[in-house]
Amino acid sequence: MNELSNSSTSGGSVFTEPPPAVTAEKLSKRYGSVRACDEVDIELFRGEIHGILGENGAGKSTLMKMLIGLVLPDGGSILLDGKPVTIRDPLDASELGIGMVHQHFSLVEALTVWENVALGDNSKLDRNKIRNRVTELSKQYGLDVNPDDRVEDLPVGMRQRVELIKCLCRDPSVLILDEPTSVLTPEESEQLFASLRRVVEEEDRAVALVSHRLSEILQATDRITIMRHGAVIERCLTKDTDANSLAREMVGRDVDMGSTSEVKVKNESFEDADISLEDARRDKKDFVLELKDIVTSSSSGVRELDGFNLGIETGEIFGLAGVEGNGQSALVEVLSGLRTVSSGSVFLKREKISSNNFGRLANKGVAVIPEDRHDSGVVLDMSVADNLLFSNLEEGYRYGLLNKARKDKRAKELIEKFEIICAGPDAPMWSLSGGNQQRVVLARETSDKPLILVASQPTRGLDVGAIEYMTGQLRDLAKSGVGVLLISSELDEILSLSDRVGVIFRGKLAALMDRENADRESLGLLMGRGEV
Amino acid sequence: MSSLVSSKSSVKRRGEIVLLYAFSALGALLLSALIVEAVGANWSDVWNALLDGSLRKPGRWGRTLGSAVPMAMVAVGTIISSKVGLINIGQEGQMLVGAAFGAYVGAHMPGPGPLVIVAVIIGGFIGGAFWSGLAGALRYWRNVPEVLTTLLLVTIAANFVGYGLKNTWLLLDPDAAVGNRTQVSPQLPPDSRLPRIDLFGNNFSLSVIISLMLIILISWMLSQTIVGFRLSVVGQNQKVGKRFGISEVKQGFMAMCASGGFAGLAGSLMLTSGDFAKFRLVPGFTVNLGWTGLLVALVAREKVMAVIPVALVFAGLRTGSSFLAATGVERRVTDVVQGLLVLALLIPPAVLFIRDRRRALAQVESRT
Amino acid sequence: MGFLEAIWDVMSTESAYTAATRFAAVLVFAAVGEWVAERSGTLNISVEAMVLSGAFAGAMGYSWTKNAVVGILLGMLAGLIVSFVQAQMSHRLTADQFVVGLTLNILFLGITSFLYAEWKPSSRVASKFAIPVLSKIPLVGKALFGQSWPFLLLYLLVPFAWWLVYRTRWGLEVRAVGENPQAADVSGIDVNKRRRESIYFAGLCSGMGGAYLLLGQVGRFDDGIVAGRGFIALVAVIFGGWTLRGTIFGCLLFGSVLSFRLTLPGLGYELNTELMSSLPFLVTIVAMTVFAHRVRPPGSLARPFVRGLK
């Protein structure tokens, strides 16, 4: 533990502190002409949770990938306990004691928990030994994981824990967590942080927590490193800073955090379980979109939406808060026409739309910005002009024949109007940055005068500039009379944009209120357990 | 519709591609030469025989053209189903069923010659479309992978047609003199055969012109009409397509049927052109041309117009090989040459793909 | 009905069982190998070429040394060579595995015919080896334990394959790679390497099967010797739902059906040869259709893996 090494990169006394578990010195990575990481120095000490904060594109993911061996650095070095090491692949990193708790991609669903934990290790396959270790760790950290369960049967929060155990099984000296709480309820996040605290203090390990969420960093970490554009711009201790200073450092200027701080907070008790449509109708205003008792089931029979009711008025922004996995995806799919409902109805301006008739909703003016644009928003291998054309194929294909001039004209107009940065209408979609791809989606969806816009996690993966642009667009759209359904797991976003707020929990609308009556704590509780 | 590099470097890139292909092809030929010499035969004899048989000797390039027709049609169909992301490897069976349908129509349909010809050809398309449609239906109704069903249906087709050729009420020629000895369908009467063209001393069937026109038509359709657009969308991102009313099931099923349809068309063109079994359907009629057509499609890499040169090369190998007997070299050596050539031709696109993907990833990652 | 009578007659004749297991044996050799390969996510149509090359090499080996063991080893080597080309092209150079598979079938058909015409190996069937007590079991004894000795290799191969896939780390990684290559990759497993290795295993098994076909059954090489058995083995894997038990059952089933072509006429029954020949394929399609939701292929079957590509 207290290693007295004789390496001393900073000069001065050798015996002050043990060397950090991991030191990165001038670590760099370039992709073509872009510097993803520019001579980054960072030190991860044992006994500490080190937060790495930055917007997307700041380089924090790339930095972690270099530490874990998924990416090879172009320059600089990595030191473990003061000694230089080379990390060529995840196996090396694992042997050196660096482990990463992955977000989605490291579990094989068809295999059991213990088999998954065994993957990526090099030793002989000893079934009982591994199973016992899993049970042991599970008890030790209060994680409640059963080694013989099949991963495909486990809910998301549980899978996260399996990832954690998989990492801990290797007995790493350093744990890296990349955006771990996006799929957890506030309660589960608390549990995770508590486990991490134990890991760090009782076992003297180091933890690096990568995130873009200020509140999380402030809550869980001891030390913070802020990155921007691939470089470290600030280091501080968590106790010495606050949300505003952090935000300022992240973007380099004062950020409009929305009206969170100025809103009156009221403590009221809310109804729990589901809200009926009649209750949802506050006054006699006409709803542009109505969802009545929607029930959908997944292929395995699980009910994702369980009698969901909602009404969106013209010109309002309705913020639907909730932790991911409570039915939001199913809701968006229903409104995109990608999913049929088992029961219930969708009304657009009082006209019932059958969910079997996909394409109809889009046709009739339901615009959607999906949460994963690569999955259902854009076609990466097609051009910008093609992607802009979908909502109105007639513009490019009169009588079925391609009219390139018209297609390009439409594309150019939209590129200009929405300030999309790209090489031109024929540029392939994959060559655009995340923010610009989002603009293409926005342009396409809003350019044909929609009645309603469903925006699902619209600012995810965007840098602050792009976030500001998107929120501004949403406000403008609402002002022009479009009904906006904002679905987000970021409470700040919900609170700063919405006129009315609702909470989705286990497939039902668990709460409904005007913006003045909403506050973080209560919403958090509602999101977490459906009641205050 | 999309290009992976800017136009400035496309000239350089095209040059690269040509060089890579030429290099690989040469490598394949070299290896073939080595194998031939190692066994004691003479490569230059072989090479000359191949060239004589495919091009040089009088009348040969006409035969090469005729041989290229079914390969090209099968390839076109395969490209259509590839565009929506379906894997069809049952062309051999679809061709046979198409030829069978055509033979049935030809044997049982009364009427003026030209009408029968058209009916036979269309019958071929329908037969092939039906056969691949079965696989398509199973895929979209029960999610059975079409790569497996199309493959399984090949043997079933062979048996199905074999049975048909044993029964006069189906396909067998009732003519006693013929029927007792062999399993053949009735020979198409002279006015039900495709006319032939004489050009520069070469004689080939109208099927060449028909297939050429179809290639141009399909190429145009896929790139300049909404049909091609819809197919591409389904092939690349079904969800986006579905959102805007483009049905994966409808487009996919239609593409699957079209794919088999073209293979069936190839079969009926083979029948009516007379280039293969003298206007009769026989067991083993398709002589592996279905597999070769699939290879053509995959070497042509989804560009319909590229089917033309590739099919000609493969056809040349085929017609050239019939001249090998004179050299004393075992005829099968063309299979070796063809096999090596295909493998060699697979290398350049693979190399390019890996390189392009690395570049693309680097670009994308840099923006994350 | 005459059909039921036929079945009864068949099932009570010892020679029917012998014929069935003989036919099935080659299938099992090839299918076990392909089963492992498909669990890793690959689909190798070139099994046909592997078996054929194994048969040819077996003949050559015997012709040179008059020793059946050498023949079998050479057969395995030949299968390995074919699988090497397949694996390198489709899982290192990212060429389309179906094209490669098809091409290899044509290529090696050409090579073996060509070389056979030039070299003309002479070979014969290896000696029988009847296990003392077991081969006396009525009806099935001779079929299972009284065949030529290479048949007995199956009793080693099958348990070995099971152990390999379910009890070793290699097998765990192969299964992971077949279900979710992205996850396996992130866990530090070289996806394409495991796939190549599983294809090599298929090559060894299929080559062994081809050598068995030649040295344990037929005796003389002919380019029609394999006649689609490789395909049928592949189909058996699918029919068996990608489990080892199912695969072997499929091989036995198909082997029986296809051997009926020989046994039934011998018992005085006429049959529709085309129907019999198509039966394995028809049955597989029906099985896949009916059991579509219960049986699942490995998650990434026949889908190539390139890091960064979904």
Image: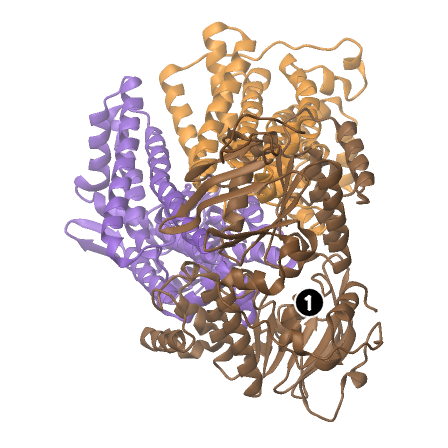
Query: In the figure, is residue C40 to the left or right of B283?
Result: right
Coordinates of residue A24 in the picture (x, y in percent): 51, 39
Q: Is residue A223 above or below residue A308?
A: above
Q: Secondary structure at mark 1?
A: helix
Coordinates of residue B112 in the picture (x, y in percent): 37, 67
The chain letter of the orange chain reads C
Give, as a three-letter code, the residue at label 1.
Gln
- Locate the N terminus of chain A by quadrant: top right
- Locate the C terminus of chain A by quadrant: bottom right
Tell me what residue is drawn at x 41 percent, y 41 percent. B287
Q: Is residue A81 above or below residue B315?
A: above
Foreground pick, B212 / C36: C36
Residue receiving disc 1: A328
Foreground pick, B357 / C41: B357
Coordinates of residue C31 in the picture (x, y in percent): 62, 31
Tell me what residue is drawn at x 62 percent, y 9 percent. C127
The image quadrant of residue A526 is: bottom right
> Is residue C42 in sight in this rendering?
no
The colour mode here is by chain
Query: In the figure, is residue A440 to the left or right of B311?
Result: right
